[in-house]
Amino acid sequence: MSTPTKKKGLGRGLTALLGNDVVIPKADTPQPGDALSVLPIEQLQAGKYQPRKQFPEAQLDELADSIKAQGIIQPIVVRAIAKGSYEIVAGERRWRASQRAGLTEVPVVIRKLDDRSVVAMALIENIQREDLNPLEEANALQQLISEFGLTHAEAAQAVGKSRTTVTNLLRLLELPVAIRELINSRQLEMGHARALLTLAPELAAKLAGEAAKEGWSVREVERRAQAFSAGKVPTTANARKPAISNDADVAALERELGDTVGARVQIQQGKKGTGKLVIHYGSHDALDGLLERLRK
């Protein structure tokens, strides 16, 4: 039987959440006290802390075919939440595919877990998986921060990422809905989104739509975002021309400052070296977080 995984690999942030002596087992690894059982499939329900929102149809169909041929090889991990009702902690894809395969019951491991352990197990393990899209990661991080009142630095420690990475991911939640939908559908990548964060919402959404339609590279979106930030309108004629170095320097500095403070930053240059530094925020909570980071 495998040994539970110590929190050490997940960072010190969880020590504050769950205590020094808590061991967080990998969700799919058998643990002492696990209760193996078979449950009617309708008694299971999706976990409320599941960060994954996208379950591609083709992948579910492929898994359903495998389940029809071989059954469920790895039990679904659940916890009891009421009489005859169980919440899925790990294995929601298997559960969904089992329904497609026509199964009426599924093998499960029933664990006694409190909310905090479920949050840690579900969110952290999913955040560390590579197949989450950036927006799913961002939502999972925001949920982790909200559940436990963490700072960006503490959340970064908890999931084994840098604070800058966490801050950049959370900034995606400030993007217009239209852009977030493009990220969710994987028509835009994290690099595209970061470039768009330097623009006003309406302009960012317009540029995002064009980028998805035309299949622009991250570099092309960055170039166009820089041009718009500098008050220029990129055209097909000048699409291959490099931006004026000063404009590029300003745009790069805006991105660097934005990454540091976790918000969209604009540099408005005036005459004789004067100018303004404008920091944008989308809500009172975002402003509170911004002030907290600036005070450090």
Image (cartoon, helix red, strand yellow):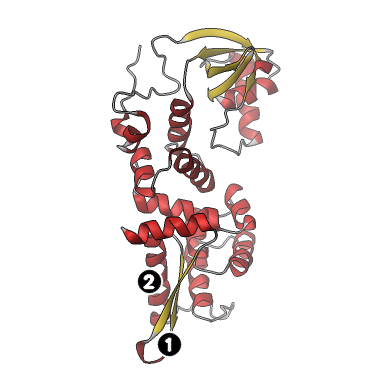
In this rendering, is residue 91 above or below 34?
A: below
> Whole-percent x and y of residue 43?
66, 16
Q: State whether residue 64 appears in this view.
A: no
- Type of residue at label 2? Leu
**Nearer the observer, 58 or 174:** 174
Q: Residues within 10 Å of mark 2 (few under 14, many from 20)?
A: some
Quarter of the image containing the N terminus? top left
Residue 270 badge: 1
> Whole-percent x and y of residue 157?
33, 41
In this rendering, is residue 154 above or below 90?
A: below
Gap in Å between the C-alphas at discs 2 and 1?
16 Å
**Residue ID at (62%, 28%):** 62
> Whole-percent x and y of residue 13?
34, 38
**Nearer the observer, 243 or 165:** 165
- Type of residue at label 1? Gly
Element marked by disc 2: helix
Q: Of callouts 2 and 1, which one flags the residue occurring earlier in the amino acid sequence?
A: 2
Residue 248 badge: none
In this rendering, is residue 246 above or below 50?
A: below
Q: Quadrant of residue 52?
A: top right
**Residue ID at (35%, 87%):** 273
Quarter of the image containing the C terminus? bottom left
In this rendering, is residue 215 above or below 86?
A: below
Element marked by disc 1: loop
254 sits left or right of 215 in the view: left
Q: Residues within 10 Å of mark 1 (few under 14, many from 20)?
A: few
Q: State whether residue 215 appears in this view.
A: yes
Q: Which residue is mark 2?
A: 253
> Whole-percent x and y of residue 163?
35, 50
117 sits left or right of 162 in the view: right
Count how many numbered circles sit on residues in the image. 2
